[in-house]
Image (cartoon, coloured by chain):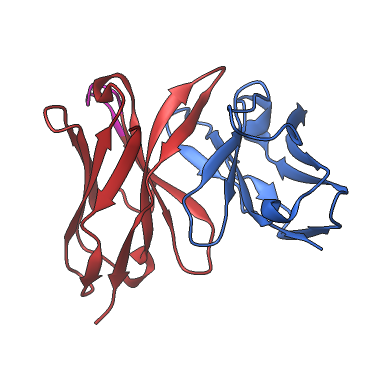
Amino acid sequence: SSELTQEPAVSVALGQTVRITCQGDIVRSYYVSWYQQKAGQAPVVVIYGKDIRPSGIPDRFSGSSSGDTASLTLTGAQAEDEADYYCNSRDSSGHHYVFGTGTKVTVL
Amino acid sequence: QVQLVESGGGVVQPGGSLRLSCAASGFTFSNFGMHWVRRAPGKGLEWVAVISYDGSNKYYADSVKGRFTISRDMSKSTVFLQMNSLRADDSAVYYCAKDNWNYDWYFDLWGRGTLVTVSS
């Protein structure tokens, strides 16, 4: 299967920690990247490769992976982190790509 | 300035055609694969198509295969998406994205998107 399943929605109190998961068989084969999309804006990559953060992305974002599940952890959530988050990977063919179902993060 | 700028969106009737463009600047266009990704209203991101850095390989999502064609013009640093036989469920904001490699492929630069509405 080339599907990636995420929690539809999570909420986190300001300054607290939240983890978003991305589950699928293809996570065992490929590195997952993570994208943040705020309302009305284009997606932005926040984690790629072997859990690498692009320059300009705060270090409160971190990634990890184990077995068939990849995770994005937000440590010390800020109001500006409220957004939709998507994981992405190549599919089993290696030539197509699949996005996770998406997680809406609300910061309380 | 490193950027991608999409254009060509609009309102089209079911069964119609539309051609999207994505103009790249600020990087060596011929070195990178380019993708189209869309987001329909109330839905999540959906990968649509990719063209390799030299244009020799193209791959499509099953939902658009046979109807959409991706291409690139190196002289204009532009990638295109020709969309034919459009359906209502093709309505979405279409983004172009540049790929990059670090342990695996990822999308490191996105445009702001262009809106396509398929409606009679």
Is residue A60 in the magenta section? no
Res. B49 in view: yes
- Give the residue at x 23% y 21%: B54
Residue A22 coordinates in the image, percent (x, y)? 70, 42
- Give the residue at x 27% y 32%: B25
Position of residue A106 in the picture relative to residue B1 (left or right)? right
Q: Quadrant of residue A28?
A: top right
- Give the residue at x 31% y 24%: B27
- Establish if A44 lies above or below B103: below
Q: Quadrant of residue B9?
A: bottom left
Tell me the colour chain A is drawn in. blue
Depth order, front residue of B27/A94: B27
**What secondary structure do most residues of the magenta stretch adopt?**
loop
The residue positioned farthest toward the left in the image shown: B75
Marker count (numbered): 0
Residue A7 coordinates in the image, percent (x, y)? 74, 55
Locate the N terminus of chain A and report the quarter of the image it occupies: top right
- Which residues are the magenta region? B52-58
Q: Quadrant of residue A9?
A: bottom right
Depth order, front residue of A56/A66: A56
The residue positioned farthest toward the front in the image shown: B1
Residue B72 coordinates in the image, percent (x, y)? 19, 34
Residue B73 coordinates in the image, percent (x, y)? 14, 32
Task: Report the chain shown in red.
Answer: B
